[in-house]
Amino acid sequence: MSGSRSTLRAWLLLLPLLIIMTTVIGWPLADTIRLSFTDARLVGTSGEWVGIGNYAAMLSSSRFWSTLATTMWFAVASVSLEMIIGVLAALLVNQSFYGRTLLRALLILPWALPTVVNASLWRLIYNPQYGALNAMLTQLGLADEYQSWLGEPSSALAALIIADTWKNFPLVALIALAALQAVPKEIRAASMVDGAGPIARFRYVVLPYLAGPLMVALVLRTIEAFKVFDIVWVMTRGGPANTTRTLSILVYQEAFSFQRAGAGASLALIIALIVTVLSTVYAVMIRKAAGSAK
């Protein structure tokens, strides 16, 4: 009887949250699903019910697949750089040296800045007329003339990846730093006494403590990178020639610029499905990592 009362009390405590989530998430989701099956402006039919027509039209569009490839490349490149730079930064600020506290505080700054502010700063850095990057490269003799980094299809996506990496690598660094604090000093000292070098100590002593937290960081950053919108919209709006257009940008264009709500809704649900699959795969990987750690 006490167990039933505890369960009932738990559900009563969760009831306000469930009502809020149903209202804030459930209703818009239901309306999005309805639009994806009823709005016929993409498939060009006159009926009120178009079924999977929007999905079929979107999945058969070369625009969708090229945008998906751009999004995947952006996510893989930016997250990989963030993981590498974040771990290296965490290893650095985990050492004992003068000014370490100040450096740790400065490390948080790029991540603490709003994404719009960060994107605006990088637009100024990349400016083809008075940008700091062009000035530095020409003064160092590494470039003969100023370049339009965001205006050239060959460099725009790479410029976005660098800006996104700068914005988000501190998150990985903070997670890795917290994990490094959990490594027992006795184990490190013992490995040094046994003659293990820096690489061996990192691989066999430090990395097992980092694996779980880094997997969590990988999940968070991959999902966010796959849904990226704000930094791309502020810096390039998907240009030039749609070379930096991501799936979220395409959803905005279909739903608002082209006034095709059904197309935007169907694409949004496709993105949600992809993110759900990624989350499930990562959850299994995290569970296996946790099991192996035990």
Image (spheres, rainbow, N blue to C red):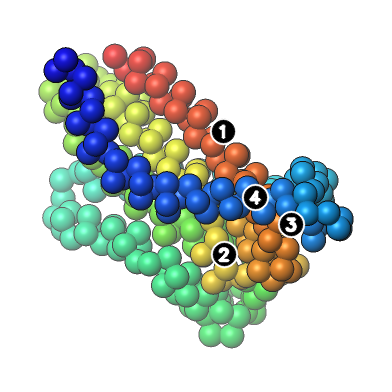
Q: What residue appears at the point 61 percent right and 70 percent down from the top-left corner?
A: 236
x and y percentages locating residue 260 in the rendered image: 73, 63
**Res 39 label:** 3
**Res 34 label:** 4
Q: CA distance from mark 2 to mark 3?
A: 28 Å
**Res 277 label:** 1
Q: Secondary structure at mark 3?
A: loop
x and y percentages locating residue 47 in the rendered image: 83, 54
Q: Which mark is in front, 4 or 1?
A: 4
**Viewer-side residue, 194 vs 241:** 241
Q: From the image, tell me which residue sits under label 2.
A: 232
Q: Is residue 65 visible?
A: no
Q: Determine whether label 4 and label 2 are within 8 Å by CB.
A: no
Q: Quadrant of residue 48?
A: bottom right
In the image: residue 263, left or right of residue 234: right
Amino acid identity at mark 3: Asp
Disc with the residue nearer the chain's start (4 vs 1): 4
Q: CA distance from mark 3 to mark 4?
A: 8 Å
Q: Secondary structure at mark 4?
A: helix
Q: Determine whether label 3 and label 4 are within 8 Å by CB.
A: no
Q: Which mark is in front, 1 or 2?
A: 1
Residues packed near mark 2 inside 10 Å, few (<14), some (14 to 19) or many (20 plus)? many
Amino acid identity at mark 2: Val
Q: Quadrant of residue 207?
A: top left
Q: CA distance from mark 3 to mark 1?
A: 26 Å
Q: Determine whether label 4 and label 1 are within 8 Å by CB.
A: no
Disc with the residue nearer the chain's start (3 vs 4): 4
x and y percentages locating residue 130 in the rendered image: 53, 85
